[in-house]
Amino acid sequence: MIVVIGSSNTDMVMQVQEFPQPGETIMGCGFMQNQGGKGANQAVACVRLGAETSFVGKLGIDSLAQNTISMLRREGIDVSQLTQTSEASSGTAFIMVDSHGENSIIVDSGANACLTPTDVDAASSLIAQASVVLMQLETPVPTLTHAARLAKEKGAIVVLNPAPAPASMLPDELLKNVDILVPNQIEVERLSGVNVKDDETLLEAIHKLQGIGVGQVVVTLGSRGAMTVIGGQPLMVPGFKVDAVDTTAAGDTFCGALCVRLSQGSNVEEAMRFACKAASLTVTRMGAQQSIPYLSEISEL
């Protein structure tokens, strides 16, 4: 089983030809509202790709929360530890997607910022059953630090997607309990302090993070694929060439797919190849959760 600890948002998505400049008003060319949030996205990816999945998170007491709970239940995700609070509204995200498939996102954390170590402790029986615990950075870092320590004690593989890119270095207490860190290029630069200009400096950043206690670092590189270091040797898993229309959920799909294969006993290289396949399908579709593929589609690819 995979336990995802993280955020859930309602996404408001606007398609545009080009992103507006400061002070500029432009016309959109399509709008949709759907479920998102890195935690919920990754949970959906896990369950669609074949893993029993539970989600630990926090919502407000509002209509957005009810829509989120209903959607996750329809996907088959256990939401017994997805709780609600009157302290904040449910999380929301405003997303612009341009004609090249690139996105720009503004997130209001809302209730996601109210997830506490006490909430994690309430889910300890679920965490004890998990083979993998997957987290991101859209919920409070002290809560994630507590969760990583608890998951490690329970014997789970701890996977952290450090997104959005943190403003400062993550605490050593969190990183030392992370078995696999899955950053993109911006995030690996921010965490390592290395200016990544090419594969050589990317490897320098990976080695630096491993030197401070992270078990394994898998860096996602968009259409290029993903890179890691195994046994001291670099490993590049290439991406699949597709016509991208929306990259919003690509990273979340990659993380979920990676964890599915890890939970099934695959090694990191096999899990990365599966994750690259899943992410390549995601970017050919609009939206966040609705773009995430099912296992049968990966098999066909």
Image: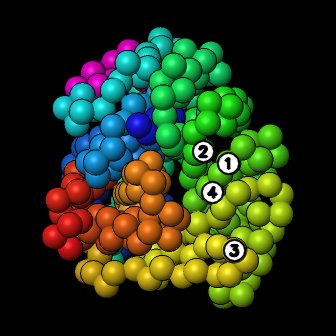
Q: Which amino acid type is marked by label 4?
A: Leu
Of residues 58 and 107, the one nearer the viewer is 58
Q: Quadrant of residue 292?
A: bottom left
Callout 2–callout 1 Cβ contact below 8 Å: yes
Mark 3, Cα crowd under 10 Å, few <14 / some 14-19 / many 20+, is few
Q: Residue at x 27, y 81 (%)?
A: 242
Of residues 42 and 104, the one nearer the viewer is 42
For marks 2 and 1, the one nearer the N-term is: 2
Image height of 249 relative to 6, above or below: below
Disc 2 element: strand
Image height of 242 relative to 291, above or below: below
Q: Mark yes or no: residue 121 visible.
A: yes
- Residue labelled with disc 4: 181
For marks 2 and 4, the one nearer the N-term is: 2
For marks 1 and 3, the one nearer the N-term is: 1
Mark 2, Cα crowd under 10 Å, few <14 / some 14-19 / many 20+, is many
Callout 4–callout 1 Cβ contact below 8 Å: yes
Of residues 107 and 183, the one nearer the viewer is 183
Mark drawn on residue 158: 2
Disc 1 element: loop
Of residues 164 and 21, the one nearer the viewer is 164
Q: Is residue 9 magenta?
A: no
For marks 3 and 2, the one nearer the N-term is: 2
- Residue labelled with disc 1: 178
